Image (cartoon, rainbow, N blue to C red):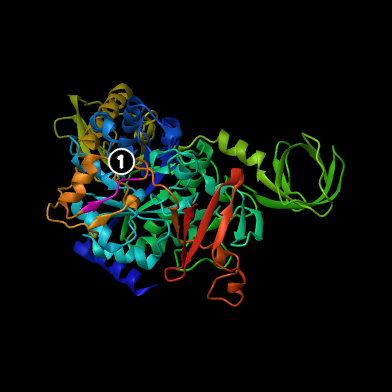
Amino acid sequence: MSKAVGRNLSQLTNEMHKPVTLELLAPARNIDTAMAAVMSGADAVYIGPESHGARRAAANSVDDIRRLVEFANPYGARVYATVNTLVYDREIRDVERLVTSLYNVGVDALIVQDMGILRMDIPPIDLHASTQCDIRTPEKARFLADAGFSRLVLPRELSLDEIAGIRDAVPSSIEIEAFIHGALCVSYSGDCRASFMAGGRSANRGECAQICRLPYDLVDINGNVIVEGRHLLSLRDLNRTSAIQDMAAAGVMSFKIEGRLKEESYVRNTVAWYSRIIDRLVSDSDGRYVRLSDGHSRPGFNPAPEKSFNRGFTTYFLTGKAPAKGMASMETPKAVGETVGRVARCTPKVITASLSARLSNGDGLGYFDQAGIFRGFRLNRVEGDRLYPASPQSVAPGTILYRNRDKEWDDEISAARPSRTINVDMCLRCLFDGRISLSLTDERGNMVEKTSAVAVNDVAVTPQEGPRKRILDKLGGTVYRAGSIVDLAGRLFIPASLLASLRREAVGLLDAARAMTYRRRLRLPEKKDAVYPQAVLSMHDNVANRLAADFYRSHGVTGITAAAEVERPEGETLVMSTRYCIRKEMGRCLRMPGGTSWPSPLFLIGPSGLRMRVDFDCARCGMDIYKV
């Protein structure tokens, strides 16, 4: 463990002797996926409203978000709305109305990129600084905390020590959020204009065309093709299963799963997987950590992240260095899956293979053809080592087969019905005047007591503890599950109808108590004297409206160039800044022997003549990519 991580662990866990609250944050493309995430163990979900979310294809009505809030809050789970695109001047009033509506239906916080929102006429809703804010330095983190953001969503590229440095730079009340799983953008989020400059679709407006997933030729200044037709900018998917404890020690409190365009089964699988990991961390922490929300989730299946869509996994730069196994998925941007065998013979209708895994009818299989292109097919049926594809195939002997869809696994997760319940302890007793009292205490220590209106005086002939326990246990249709039941009523005969009514009324009181103690954070005050770390802003600072310009000027900025989406630049333009390096990935780093065998400059040539120049910044070990 690094010194910075160790220092932060001490700071975070010892300050005022309060435990650190941990949050598992799940994506949701719609309300059904969001509810499934909560049931699978998410402490919070982030979801896009009807406009200005960074995934235009994942928009939801305010009424649906209201229903989600009503579903999530009884578990203590939060709902965050993504209003994290750039806002144009003509849209300011529409965004103000949207934010007001989201606040009124109970949304806990907004995730935002555009600083113009801080100057809008909106309610005091809590604000999280999106990863699109490109928070690479402690100085910028400190400024955003001073500006009134309660949470900072950090870039995926940061190392543990860099995360710890930012944690040190801001007040302890400011929350740190970081990604742990899902697709990776090759560029620093918010600092990519490749899609916009290539085809007019802006990532900062929720319309990314994902040109980083395309195949490219790598060409030198003389037109010589060094690498042909590979997905040079397509990264593997993030998986930080083994790093959750270290990230918590570095100061991360919110662990974020990427994937607002992913299907429900993907979200349920990844949420259930990481929820178990965080539960173990909490239980082994001797009280240092607690979960944000309440309840115990039962997903109904054994989660396995490798079974859901992925391009292969990487921890990215968490150690500060590129992983030894590489981080790009250059052969294909598709999910290849697990190796399941090797082809021995093939006719169009039958493939004979030596298999290393048991296959099922309906599995999705794939292989790389002799041109290096990944081909996929559905398996109609399997008989021993004979595979019958749903469409004719021509696969060379010796070709490796992969499975990227496990039909049995899909059926298992589809059939599973996740549940989530909050433990409640009960105490039944008889008061001195003969009335019956039932008290309920939940996991957070909320306690309510309901007393019967009438006295009970009859004594039972037979023991009553068993029948009374069965009645008190009947908590179906609520979010609760009986924990300990202390029965102090002895041989008193309590009519079943009276006891059931007492239970229902006590549960209603507990619902009300939990609702009363649920608190939304409000927007933090803005320090008017805070000075932005830069005096002059370029198009990379994404200023797209007059309110954002006013915000920056009020904090010391003297010069502003508008965002590319507002004033499209002419000529060669820097469209992407990355920490990933093609040279390093392919063993041609300029600091390594043989690196100079690839002479600079180099160019990426993509489909339809797309041409980009690559500059290698060895000082920071990264790349800058220019549209030419």
Is residue 405 one of those drawn in magenta?
Answer: no
In the rendered image, the residue lying farthest to the left is 529
Image side of residue 500 versus residue 420, left or right: left
Left-right relation of 528 to 59 = left
Q: Is residue 337 above or below residue 57?
A: below
Whether 555 is drawn above or below 617: the answer is above
- Give x and y (percent) for residue 150: 24, 50
How many numbered marks, from 0 up?
1
Confirm whether residue 200 shows in the render.
yes
What's under tag 1, amino acid-wise? Answer: Gly
* Most frequent secondary structure within the magenta stretch: loop
Numbered range of the magenta stretch: 559-563
Q: Which residue is mark 1?
A: 76
Residue 610 percent across, percent down from the top left: 56, 47
Q: Residue furthest bottom?
A: 593
10 Å crowding of disc 1: few (<14), some (14-19), many (20+): many
Kindly state the secondary structure of the residue where label 1 is placed: loop
Between residues 493 and 259, which one lies in front from this camera angle? 259
Q: Quadrant of the N terminus?
A: bottom left
Q: Residue at x 71, y 36 (%)?
A: 362
Q: Is residue 365 left or right of residue 177?
A: right
Q: Is residue 560 magenta?
A: yes
Q: Is residue 455 left or right of residue 214?
A: left
Whether residue 174 is situated above or below residue 259 in the rendered picture? below
- Looking at the image, which is closer to me, 105 or 75? 105
Judging depth in this view, the residue of 409 and 148 nearest the camera is: 148
Residue 579 image point, x, y percent: 45, 61
Q: Nearer the viewer, residue 425 or 570?
A: 570
